Amino acid sequence: MKSKYLYFCLITVCLSCNGSSEKSIINSGYKNTLHRSGSRLEIPIDKTTLNITSCLFLTETGTEVAYLNSNKNSIQFYSLDSLKLTDEIPLQQEGPDGVGSVFGFRALTRDSIYIVSTQYSKLFLVNNNGKVIQTIDYTRDKTGRYLAPAKIQSKAPMQQIEFVNGKIYLTGLALGNWTSMTNDQLLESSICIEIDTVKKMVEQLAYSYPKDYWIEGVREPVFSRVFDGENFIYSFYGDENIYVTKDHKNVQKIPASSNFIKNIPPYPNDGDMDNMLRYYCRTSYYSTIMYDKYRSVYYRFAFIGHEPEKDENLMKSVMNPTTPSIIVLDKDFQIISETRLDDNVYWVSNSFITEKGLFISKNHPQNPNANDDKLVFELFTIEEL
């Protein structure tokens, strides 16, 4: 399992990097496109803050970006109006207010932040001083089964904490040795954790992976999930479809494929490190799905694989996603656009949506114009061709 867990950690930020110039955006033939508006946000940061993060979300007010500073185990707040740091909340790793090393969060307001950590199957609610005001333990569900810490992050594939009718929804993951697990065993894995905050009850919902996900062989069992106010929408790494459900019982399977992805092969039979890294470089896959409440559309991100060059640094390539494509679906989940972005320019894991449109970070590690001293986001809007 250790080797596969390593591969999972790699793939959550993967594919490669070859070249650095900004090219024309490629539209895949629809009547709409994601238009590079030319407008950008540039927010100064200090020397203790990296220019990309594993977890970034817009607050519920829509006026601030909440940003995980892993170097300091803190949550920073940046105003989209003043383009300045307005607050920083240090989080203790140990002691009465200890939350461990922060893995992810959801900031409802500056004074109400839900934290998940790498160490604990616990959900911590902290205030603007970093004081823990509530702890929800989901170590075991109501049947006594053990639950691993939730993977809440903005880095691909994005997963976030959802709040619906007094219940909290976290994401799960298939536990066990993926190389020896069968498709039937995979389907025994719940991928949604429901926490009833009134009854203080934790339940693993029966919802799992698509029934045929591993029929042709093992693919990455990772996924993205978003809630649009009515539906939960799931996007799986190796599946061209998306899955829409209100109750995690009745599920609608909807085609949402990329014109740039023909097939997503399973793991190679010889899964040594070199072969796996080459597999990840070559393999295109589906990643984050986001909901735009201002335009009632969904953005489904994909990454396009490439054939590694002879002397290419495979590990570096896998760790730096290079060629993103963004599929746009309307309120009825019909594709209205797909746009392939420039190589090695955009760090799409750091994206957020406002009334103006979709903002995407330009601080890709291989972007020669990336700025170490600023968070730089470019605005994309949906336009008719």
Image (cartoon, rainbow, N blue to C red):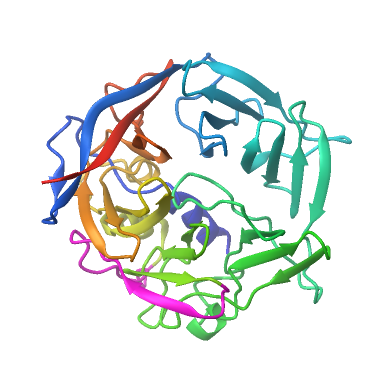
Q: Which one is in front, 39 or 219?
A: 39
| In the depicted structure, whether residue 372 falls above or below residue 214 | above
Residue 116 percent location from the top left of the image: 68, 46
Q: Where's the N terminus, which quadrant? A: bottom right
Magenta run includes residue 268: yes
Return the residue found at the far bottom. Answer: 184
Residue 67 lies in what quarter of the image? top right
In the picture, measured across the screen, residue 173 lies left or right of residue 314, that is right
Residue 380 lies in what quarter of the image? top left
- At horizontal 51% and vertical 80% (from top left) the residue drawn is 250
Question: Magenta stretch?
Answer: 247-270
- At horizontal 24% and vertical 69% (from top left) the residue drawn is 263
Q: Is residue 342 visible?
A: no
Magenta run includes residue 274: no
In the picture, measured across the screen, residue 219 lies left or right of residue 34, that is right
Q: Which one is in front, 331 or 185?
A: 331
| In the depicted structure, whether residue 315 falls above or below residue 365 | below
Label tally = 0
The rendered magenta stretch, by its main secondary structure, is classed as loop
Residue 88 percent location from the top left of the image: 65, 22
Residue 95 percent location from the top left of the image: 87, 34
Residue 112 percent location from the top left of the image: 71, 37
- At horizontal 51% and vertical 29% (from top left) the residue drawn is 63
Return the residue found at the far right. Answer: 96
In the picture, measured across the screen, residue 164 lies left or right of residue 47, that is right
- At horizontal 52% and vertical 85% (from top left) the residue drawn is 184
| In the depicted structure, whether residue 59 falls above or below residue 291 | above
Q: Is residue 175 visible?
A: yes
